[in-house]
Image: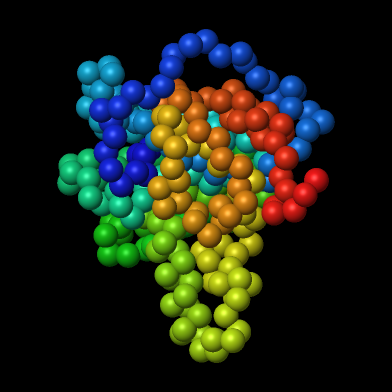
Amino acid sequence: MPRDDQVDQDDQDGGADAPRAVVRASDLIGGPIPAHVACVMDGNGRWAARRGLPRTDGHAAGEAALLDAVEGALDLGIPWITMYAFSTENWRRPADEVRYLMGFNESLLLRRRDELHDKGVRIRFAGRRDWRVPKRVLRRMDESIDLTRNNRRCTLTMAFNYGGRAEIVDAVQRLVADGVPADKVNEKAIRSRLYFPDQPDPDLVIRTSGEHRISNFLLWQLAYSELVFDDVLWPDFRRTHLFEAVRDFQRRQRRYGGVT
């Protein structure tokens, strides 16, 4: 899966390779489990470059990380998980890479949607369905949505052709189209017009590869999310990294502007 960043940073170091203590799902029992975890899947290009491989090989290797992260969410009983799969800025990449990513995401759905369906995962897509997305990819997306729409064990939202600013712009345009008067425009009115108003805000956001920014991801929803920045490159991410982030989350105090 591609990283979302607007500026290519693949010449930077992805982080330390020191051994890490293994955290298991059982270690987290008794603590708060986030209801919604969102991930910025970053570092595919650097992972490939370190191995002398094409960037596309890094995206392909990220598939295993995605599936293992979802498995980890199921292990913990996390009901919502969102993955930043392709941003509105990713269209700026070389045409060959964009074509590969469109085909890769299509084939990923064909390979994995039945498996996710069997595990009780509902698949959804957040983002703009505009002319740039090939119609065959849109068909695979719709097929995956239809297949899994009644699953409730976990909802996997793929942020595809997604931008946080674009989502807010689209919500405001719906407000205008609905004729909402200015004195009725409030947070509730805007939230109800986001792509998925039923989805809770992320409790925890994880970004891999050592970068420390949110890169136009879920800008409205991240107001009170806990942020974890991990040095691991996305293709090397596994459920134990998710468990580490949840352990970090459990150690934090969430005050929402108040005092404990």
- Where residue 35 appears, as percent x and y from the top left, is 68, 46
- Where residue 9 appears, as percent x and y from the top left, is 29, 34
Q: In front here: 1 or 105?
A: 1
Is the residue 257 above or below the residue 128 in the image?
above
Q: How many marks?
A: 0
Q: Residue furthest top?
A: 19
Residue at image location 52% in from the left, 50% down from the top: 157
Instruction: Tell me if I can see residue 56 in this picture.
Output: yes
Q: In front here: 206 or 79?
A: 206
- Where residue 51 appears, as percent x and y from the top left, is 27, 17
| Residue 75 appears left or right of 68 | right
Which quadrant of the rendered structure holds the N terminus?
top left
Q: Residue furthest left?
A: 95
- Where residue 84 appears, as percent x and y from the top left, is 44, 45
Q: Quadrant of residue 96?
A: top left
Q: How is the image coloured?
A: rainbow
Instruction: Tell me if I can see residue 72 in this picture.
Output: no
Q: Quadrant of residue 32?
A: top right
Q: Residue furthest front?
A: 259
Residue at image location 44% in from the left, 77% down from the top: 173
Residue at image location 77% in from the left, 49% down from the top: 259
Residue at image location 50% in from the left, 33% down from the top: 229
